[in-house]
Image (spheres, helix red, strand yellow):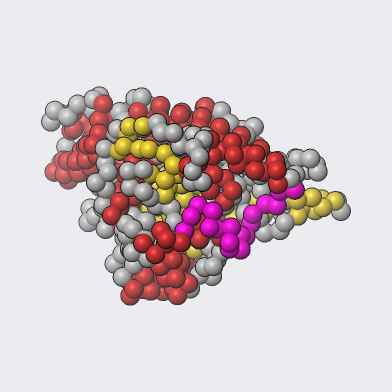
Amino acid sequence: MNRLSTILSVILAACLKADAFQLQKNRRVVLKASSGATGCGGSSRSHYQYNMVATNSNSNSAASTNSAASNTWSPDSWRNKKASQMPVYEDQEELQQAVAKLRKCSPLVFAGEVRQLSDALARATQGQGFLLMGGDCAEAFEEFHVDKVRDTFRVLLQMALVLCFGSALPIIKVGRMAGQFAKPRSEPDEVRQGVALPSYRGDIINSDAFTPQARRNNPNNMVEAYHQSAQTLNILRAFASGGYADISRLHAWNLDFVEQTDEGSRYRKLATKVDESLRFMKAIGLDTSSAEFKKTDFYTAHESLLLEYEEALTRQDSTTGRWYDCSAHMLWVGERTRDLDGAHLEFARGVHNPIGVKVSDKCTPEELIRIIEKINPNNVPGKIVVIVRMGAEKLRTNLPGLIRGIQREGKSVLWISDPVHGNTYKTASGYKTRDFDRIRSELRAFFDVHDDMGTHPGGVHLEMTGEDVTECVGGISDVTEASLADRYKTFCDPRLNGAQALELAFLISERMRRRTGLPPIE
């Protein structure tokens, strides 16, 4: 092994070992039962409260307080604002019964886990981490299966290993899973052959079948979504801590991927370097079969769209007095719901979860600054993730101004790219799809802008699946417009398949190598 390979090996070993150490340090979260834990207490706020003791309570992000907001904000204060993209329920009594059931349910995630993610994101804002977000456009009840959860989780871990090697940074892994059910819609109704019915807004609200009964907004779907999310989280936690994340296993799966590529391809060369690093780690005495190399941290996120659901799962941490939305570790606010005086930003400003803000070319620097000041007035690192979705050319034109505005005001944000949403089009045969080359072009533009600005390209956000679907054209899997019909399964927008997502990870890894000053792999 030459000197360069040795240096790379040490970098990878240190990076993965540090990630494993942080995992062990923050692993244990202890729950304590209280009279209000299930929402049965007599206090008007008891249905939000639960007790929690977390070993990582000395979190930097826990220092964040919003004294002004804490006096005026409550989990239901969003009801005083205009709520966009919210369903109208015809039976209010049925709605209240469903919400009451959710308030009695256990939290899906816990404050200690959220603080751990906030700390990792805070480090990433300083250039000491890279955020990988991925998962389904929208989860569906009928599509739920342990194998599908496992396959997407596996691909995300494979991507993380490749990105870790290329960037020499810890990779923060967040799945669009265990709650990504609701979807915004451009039109309230859908018309087919002259028949108008309410639009399908995701399984947590109504159903996809084009019938009046299916398209009825059913509040009981929220309860079903909660229980499916609980199952998904159980599966993810078992895989994350039960040995499925073994680093050697991940590398073996990546080798299966590169077998599909041409002899001498860039992917094979990069995989060879990773293999050399693993061999070096073993040679110097690092036991890659130990627990530290078989476990990983994995978090969940979804769009905070259905506020009835989010409010019902918001809890107050008795150790800090702070509020957390316990439906997910991280939430994001979409392009259609980030009105400055709207209900969604009102809700987001009061919870202590990390908040993503999706921005397109329509967002001005002034608007973005006002949004950030509303959600994060104390400028706490790790609180705000700006998710950029513009298309390559618009990104090159508009992103520099946003970055300059944030720099001028001294705001702490993590910039990540969503290269998928801005590159959707409909084929002549009627299929909605996305082109791999356009996605790659937007990612390249994102990195180019940050190189020019001297800022940190902090992550990537992808709609993808571990399944071998044919929904996006191009890439190593060679999906064409003619083959889209072969395995087009999405309930909403087209997703990258596992091979396409992993190919992007290899491309990003190569780009990150250049940022670290390492030469391209020859």
Direction front: furthest residue:
42
Dividing the picture into quarters, in which one does residue 7 lie?
Answer: top left
Against 345, is 481 above or below?
above
The answer to if 80 sits in the magenta stretch is yes
Residue 400 is left or right of residue 165, and the answer is right
110 or 246: nearer the viewer: 110
Tell me where residue 180 appears, x and y as whole percent: 54, 44
Residue 351 is left or right of residue 216, and the answer is left
Tell me where residue 522 appears, x and y as whole percent: 28, 47
Q: Which residue sits at x=18%, y=33%?
A: 280
Direction right: furthest residue:
194
Query: Can you see residue 157?
Result: yes
The answer to if 151 sits in the magenta stretch is no
Q: Which residue sits at x=36%, y=32%?
A: 31
Q: Which residue sits at x=53%, y=58%?
A: 77
Tell me where residue 69 appears, x and y as whole percent: 42, 62
* Count of all numbered marks drawn on residues in the image: 0
221 or 76: nearer the viewer: 76
248 or 16: nearer the viewer: 16
| The N terminus sits in image quarter | top left
Query: Can you see residue 423?
Result: no
Q: Which residue sits at x=38%, y=38%?
A: 51
Residue 464 is left or right of residue 223, and the answer is left
- Magenta: main secondary structure equals loop
1 or 510: nearer the viewer: 510
Which region is colored magenta? Answer: 73-90
Against 58, is 224 above or below?
above
Dividing the picture into quarters, in which one does residue 53 lie?
Answer: top left
Tell me where residue 241 appears, x and y as whole percent: 35, 28
